[in-house]
Image (tube, rainbow, N blue to C red):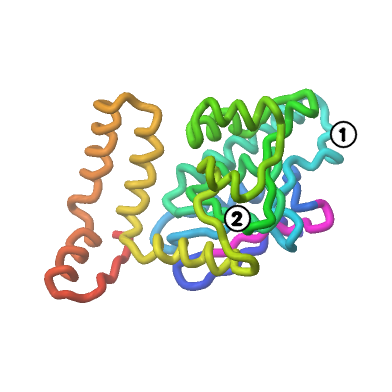
Amino acid sequence: MADLEIQRRGATEYWTILGEERRNTLTRSLVAELEERVTALKGSHAPRAVVLTGVGDRAFCAGADLKERSSMSDEEVRAFLESLGRAFRAIELSPSIFVAALNGIALGGGLELALACDFRVAGPAVEMGLSEVKLGIIPGGGGTQRLSRLVGIGRAKDLILTGRRINAAEAFSFGVVTRLAPEGRLLETATSLAEAVAANAPLAVGAAKHAIDEGAAQPLDLALEVERRHYATLLHTEDRREGLKAFAEKRPPSFKGR
């Protein structure tokens, strides 16, 4: 049985985590399917954007499935964390843009999954947090690193060391959430964002995404070299020629991802 429901609408795919009764927690089978599907996003047939959400209205993802985790050996836990890390890193390295549509709570690994995405859109009633210290552990899916890079060390420590939950408004003020969606318009807001990205040249979007991510932790001079390297990959593409031609002809461009 699949753990993700996939629907394609134009250049955007919608991935829905299936597991409402367990609050869409991260099981081993879900993580394996997520890694497999993200890794397969290559070539011209890949969606330009993916909107990732959870089924129902209670949870985007409530983190690791603790019932499943309780039966794992230490070796199995390590293997699970490695699989989790590969899946989340694959999202960041994917040429597709990922929009996490937070339809309910995003806790622990669920928030870490959202942090690996390019954008996070949340409804007004959503709560999120990295509460692992309350269980005697720390975030193990990249939360300590991605959150601190996103919001700064001080705010990351505030959230991680207290283990407290924050609401959508505070998450937006911190920079954890990219956009707030009005009540009942979560997918509409996430779709609008995804389509705005998908309308642009896909090779350029991918290059800009990777330039930002790679350069973020580098000194400025090295980061500028990263930018120039990614810029150079676009110079001889069909999309670049099409963009210039469409601008000169005063018409919308038709990008092919080549």
Q: Amino acid at mark 1?
A: Ser
Residue at 46%, 54% (x, y): give it.
97
| Alpha-carbon span between mark 1 and mark 2 | 33 Å
Residue 16 in percent (x, y) is at 65, 60
Q: Which residue is mark 1?
A: 71
| Crowd rating for badge 1 (residues with CA inside 10 Å; few <14, some 14–19, many 20+) | few
Of helix, strand and loop, which one carries label 1? Answer: loop
Above-or-below relation of 141 to 113: above
Residue at the farthest left position: 248
Q: Secondary structure at mark 2?
A: strand
Q: In this orientation, does residue 122 appear?
A: yes
Residue 78 in which image quadrant: top right
Residue 18: say if magenta.
yes
Residue located at (45% from left, 43% from top)? 93
Residue in view at x 70 percent, y 42 percent: 107
Residue 43, x across and y down, in percent: 41, 57
Would residue 31 be visible to someone looking at this image? Answer: no
- Could you tell whether 45 is left or right of 250 in the image? right
Quadrant housing residue 254: bottom left
The residue under label 2 is which amino acid type? Answer: Ala
| Of the two numbered discs 1 and 2 in the rendering, the one whose residue sits closer to the viewer | 2
Q: Nearer the viewer, residue 223 or 39?
A: 223
* Residue at screen point 79% across, 42% down: 65
- What residue sits right under mark 2 in the picture? 122
| Residues in magenta, as a range | 13-22
Specify whether 26 is left or right of 233: right
Does 176 appear in magenta? no
Q: Residues within 10 Å of mark 2 (few under 14, many from 20)?
A: many
Pick whichever of labels 1 and 2 is earlier in the sequence: 1
Using the image as rendered, state which of residue 226 and residue 62 is in the foreground: 62
**Is residue 56 or residue 226 the one in the foreground?**
56
